[in-house]
Structure formats: C-alpha cells, structure tokens
Image (cartoon, rainbow, N blue to C red):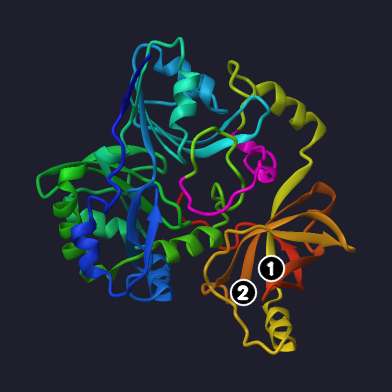
C-alpha cells in the first residue's frame, strides 16, 4: 500500500477569487480547513433559486480520496456495504461505510473512474481508509486540495450546463459521470447533488477553478442562475430528507470530523437506523460490519429515522412566557434535542429547520422503533435561555418534498 496526502489550503477554495466578489454579506462558513460563503445575499432567495431556477454551489471542502491499483476493486468491495462488483466504469454508488459493529463511519459517493481507480467523496475518513488498505496492492491518496467541487442544482441546471459546454445531457442518467469541456478546460462531471433537485457536480482541477466558475456564472444568467451558500443548501438537503454526518449521526471512525460542531459518540448509528438499509447488500462478498448488520436486519434496528414536524407556535409561546422575544432561526440545528414519549426519552431530534418551501418547521428524529409510526406525537426538549421548553413534534413521512433528482 502506498499513501499520498495532498492536504488542504486552510484559506479559500479554488473558486474563492470569484465567490468573494459575489458575497455581499459577512457570512462565511469554515469547513475542513477552508472558508466558503455561507450566505451571498439572502438564504431564502438562494434556496428559491435551487427550487425554481438554478444555483451554483461551492462544495470544494468536501473530502475527496482516490484508491487505485491492482487490488482496488477488491478493497472497495470490502469497504462499502453495496456489491462493488456491479459498479461499472463511469458509474457512481451512494453507499454507507461501516465499522465492524455495523456503525456508520460515513456515507457518501464512490466513483469508478476506470478498471482499477476509484474516487470517494464523503466525510473525513483518510486514516481509516489507510488502516483498511493494509495488505492490499493499492495507492491511497487524499486528493481534496487537487480539485474544486462545484454543484449546479435546480430545474434549469441542465440548460445552464448545456449552454456552458455545448453538449446535451438529457441522456446522462442519475449517478453517472462524463468528461466535459468548459472554456477549453476539462472537468469531470457527475449527475448528482444534495438538494433533491436535478443537478450536477463538477470536479475541476484547482488551477482551473476561476475560469470554470466565471464561464458558468456568465452563461447561466439568462436562466436565473444564482450563487447559493451553505446556509441555503443545508435547508435544501433537509427538505429532501437527506442526512448529514455529525448533524444526524456521529461517524464511528478515528479521523477528525470535518464539521466544527460538538458531536457525541452516543449518536453513532447503523445504516438501518439512518434509513439506508436499501444500500446494504448481503449477497456479495464480506464487507466490514456485514455480520453485525445481518444480525440487525434479522432482529430489526433498535432505532429508526423518521421525518418530524415541529409546532413552531409553541416555541414562540414558550419564549413569550419567559418574557423573551421569539427566537426561531431558519438555520438548520446541528445539535440533537431529546425526544420524549409520555415523559420517557425515546430518541433524539436532529436537523430541525424552518422550511421556506413548505412553510413548516421540519427535521428528523431517530427514535426507538415502536415510536416511529406516522402520526405519533412526541415532546421535544427545546432550549430557551438556559432552560427547556416542551414542544410538540409529530412523526411524518420523509422526504418532505418530491425528489426530482433522479
């Protein structure tokens, strides 16, 4: 096994020269050693662009790894819970990666670049990958700093991309990749995204970042293209029912987490508990955590992830009762709040946010299985000025919006 580590910039992404000119606020977001815009103008307007037109999003801090060499197919099949022998060249798998206890290390994307080369984009698990690769004839590389990552999302994203590249993408299926050219620059393009909308992700060589952004921005204006920051995109992924490591579960690996927020080992979870059971394939060869997950599939998971609707009016009332102005931020809460049934703790509520698309306060709840039926009423302990308000939450279907990306 050979190890290559590129490291991160610690400053701005490959698109920073362009995004810094567009950012009209002082809101920046620290992520994996980078800073990227959190809000350009207004998060509600940026979310509206995702849902109604097109948005360009800087996702460069997302950790990226490459595994190559004669044993790469065998190692990937061991690392992921899906059958990697069925992953074709230029195809992408969304997949969990687990430890021996069946707890999620991370969830993310695996790209098959050629017969012996794979790329992964997911939370930081570099040292864990190195540990698992011991004894395999592979090269493990941290390529995070080698590529900028642009996400182009929304119902008009395809039109923007076609205008920029001069190519037709109507025949590119979900979770497939293709090489494209923008202003004479090669980009690695995948039909993917984290918003629930039809969209694309573009891997761009770091030195080519400014020219690629400038051309997409300029040619995308007739289609209503806007830049969207992390604030809006976090709301978009909740509306689409998509989980996020550290916000909705704690990764079980040894690596430092990317998110600069408190995380708790008690919040470790299995794919079945996080609603990812359909991505666990027991028919293939052994993978890490297979025995533990098979047992859980037979016995049933102790917890399950559900959608949650929060009665926001009770939050306002609780603040008023304490002589305080209501404080209901649309920002997604990354702290887990205790969920109770008849005064007994039965799980946690996570990723709670105001949804401008639905005009509702929504989120997730990881609950003991008997309390996951739609319509179940829970009590959420809501922090208010150092105390707790008891707020009603109701189990509802997830995702909260119609998924259009596939």
Q: Name the residue nearer the viewer: 40 or 203.
A: 40
Across and down, in percent, residue 349 comes to 69, 59
Mark 1–mark 2 CB contact (< 8 Å): yes
Across and down, in percent, residue 313 comes to 69, 82
Picture quadrant where residue 147 is located: top left
Instruction: Say left or right for 245 vs 109.
Output: right
- Tell me the element at label 1: strand
Tell which circle, 1 or 2, labels the residue nearer the N-terminal end: 1
**Which disc is residue 360 wearing?**
2
What range of the chain is rendered magenta? 258-279
Q: Does any portion of residue 18 appear in the rendered image?
A: yes
- Tell me the element at label 2: strand
Residue at the image point whose x is 32% and y is 39% from the top: 144
Q: Mark 1 points at which residue?
A: 309
Q: Does any portion of residue 163 appear in the rendered image?
A: no
- Assign the magenta stretch its main secondary structure: loop
Distance from label 1 to label 2 (Cα)?
7 Å
Across and down, in percent, residue 275 comes to 65, 44
């Amino acid at each position: 096994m050979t190890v290559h580590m590129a490291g991160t910039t610690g400053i701005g992404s490959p698109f920073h020269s362009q995004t810094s000119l567009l950012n009209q606020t002082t809101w920046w977001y620290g992520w994996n050693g980078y800073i990227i815009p959190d809000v350009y103008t207004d998060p509600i307007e940026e979310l509206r662009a995702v849902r109604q037109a097109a948005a360009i999003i800087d996702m460069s801090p997302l950790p990226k790894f490459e595994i190559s060499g004669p044993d790469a197919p065998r190692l990937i099949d061991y690392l992921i819970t899906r059958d990697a022998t069925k992953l074709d060249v230029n195809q992408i798998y969304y997949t969990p990666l687990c430890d021996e206890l069946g707890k999620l290390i991370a969830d993310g994307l695996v790209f098959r670049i050629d017969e012996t080369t794979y790329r992964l984009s997911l939370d930081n698990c570099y040292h864990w990958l190195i540990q698992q690769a011991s004894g395999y004839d592979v090269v493990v590389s941290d390529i995070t700093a080698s590529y900028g990552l642009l996400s182009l999302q929304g119902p008009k994203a395809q039109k923007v991309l076609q205008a920029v590249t001069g190519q037709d993408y109507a025949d590119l299926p979900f979770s497939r990749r293709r090489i494209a050219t923008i202003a004479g620059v090669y980009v690695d393009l995948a039909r993917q995204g984290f918003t629930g909308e039809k969209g694309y992700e573009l891997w761009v060589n770091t030195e080519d970042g400014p020219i690629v952004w400038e051309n997409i921005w300029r040619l995308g204006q007739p289609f209503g293209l806007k830049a969207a920051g992390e604030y809006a995109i976090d709301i978009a992924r909740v509306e689409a029912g998509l989980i996020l490591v550290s916000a909705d579960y704690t990764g079980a690996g040894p690596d430092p987490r990317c998110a600069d927020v408190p995380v708790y080992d008690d919040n470790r979870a299995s794919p079945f508990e996080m609603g990812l059971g359909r991505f666990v394939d027991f028919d293939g060869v052994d993978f890490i955590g297979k025995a533990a997950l098979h047992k859980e599939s037979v016995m049933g998971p102790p917890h399950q992830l559900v959608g949650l609707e929060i009665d926001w009016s009770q939050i306002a009332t609780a603040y008023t009762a304490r002589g305080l102005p209501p404080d209901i931020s649309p920002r997604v809460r990354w702290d887990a709040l205790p969920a109770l049934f008849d005064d007994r703790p039965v799980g946690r509520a996570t990723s709670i946010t105001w949804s401008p698309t639905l005009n509702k306060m929504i989120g997730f709840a990881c609950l003991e299985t008997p309390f996951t039926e739609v319509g179940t009423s829970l009590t959420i302990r809501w922090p208010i000025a150092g105390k707790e308000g008891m707020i009603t939450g109701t189990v509802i279907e997830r995702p909260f919006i119609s998924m259009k990306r596939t």
